Amino acid sequence: MITFIIVGVNLNYQSIIDKIDEDLILRLTKDLVALDSQNPPGRTDHITKYLEEESKSLGFQSQIYKLDDKRQNIVITFGKSERDIVLSGHLDTVPFGDKSQWKYPPLEVTEKDGKLFGRGTVDMKGGVASLIAVMDAISRSDVNLSHRIVFAGTADEEVGMNGAFQLKEKGVMDNADCLIITEATDLKVGIAEKGPYWIRMNVKGKAAHGSMPEAGINAIDGACIGINKLKKILPDTKHDILGKSTLNVSMIKGGVTINVVPDECYVDCDFRLIPEDKHDELNGQIKTLLLKLSKENSCVFSHKVFHSLPALSTNPNESIIKGLLKHSNLVTNTTSDPIGLTYGTDAAALVPPDNIPFAIIGGGCPSVLHQANEYVYLSDLVKASKIILGGILDTYVKK
């Protein structure tokens, strides 16, 4: 039993943490997985309706925000304060993929050896259940928090993060002092994430008969030159947790048939940037490089940006981060430093430009994300709830 003393008052935090309801987490996870929200098309209206009803039965307030008729966000609140703690999880999932690769039905939870199998169990309907359980435990205790608890359930995270962007525009983050998202981290505390910066490099040449390549300008040859040059402009800056920015050349398309010199080729490039490497600066370097290549080669090079999210990093000395780290170590019986994420989350849409403290922490292993036979241990969902609740209690009990 762990007891903390705050301003002379003996508050038994462990008794509150023990209120995390495993049965509630299991039930919510099962019900949410059964509601198909593969993205595309990313339907979530049936999920927001379900969570609206659950919120009412648990004594919470809720409001639904529509992206369109089928894609909806939900905001659930408990408590009263001028300042908020925002807990967030997305409601959509990636597609099943090849159903023949699934050992268990993807639209229902199969329990086996402590694992919950099903699409969304780890990414992240189980995480949503963990957050609702945190709110439930707080509501059934007599703890006096200095902040209101806000759950932001978002649509479209897996494609464009449009749900998170909408909630930001609606003011859901206006009074927030921290953000916690339950993506899978193996119960480690994530405090930094790289920002995706996706470009398409276009290369134009000149068509000719394949038997006379000297009469044309081969756009695929030009693309090969451009790819090698793009790799060399990556900054050498290093982040303490995230390491260096990276580039993955992920898709290339060019040519019309085997006996024609290709007159056009495009290359899709996935940059993942650390906070120190600015998107605008990289864009300027790419533009300068491609103009130079156009002058030095027969091909004409250009590019466009089609997806961009900021990289984020939180100071590990923030009180909420210290609290989460402490309880992560207590609950898992291990010692772990903060981690960084190579991928982006809804935090990239919700946090800027205020740069409030944020943490990404959830049950489940990142290696099973987007895979067939996705699973999470029920015990890890419960542990995630306890870690988050502990961090909140350490940081936001009214003194």
Image (cartoon, grey):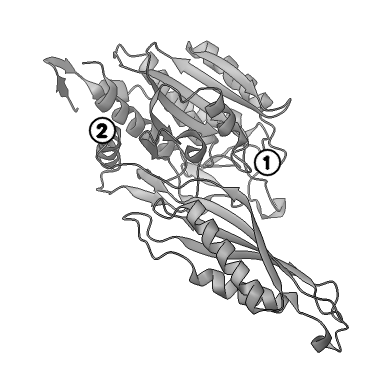
The amino acid type, in three-letter code, at marker 1 is: Asn
From where the camera sits, is residue 373 visible? no
Badge 2 element: helix
Q: Residue at x 50, y 47 (%)?
A: 344
Vertical placement of 384 versus 79: above or below?
A: below
x and y, in percent, of residue 25 in the image: 47, 28
SS type, badge 1: loop
Q: Is residue 17 above or below residue 200?
A: above
Residue 49 falls in which quadrant of the image?
Answer: top right
Residue positioned 71% across, 54% down in the render: 100
Identify the residue position indicated by label 2 in the image: 319
Residue 39 disc label: 1
Q: Nearer the viewer, residue 280 or 28?
A: 280
Front-most of residues 109 and 216: 216
Q: From the viewer's perspective, is 190 left or right of 76?
A: left
In the image, residue 361 lies at what x, y percent? 40, 40
**Where residue 57 sits: x, y (%)?**
53, 11
Quadrant in which the N terminus is drawn: top left
Residue at point 57% right, 68% down? 289
Amino acid type at circle 2 is Ser
Q: CA–CA distance between discs 1 and 2?
A: 36 Å
Which residue extends farthest left?
8
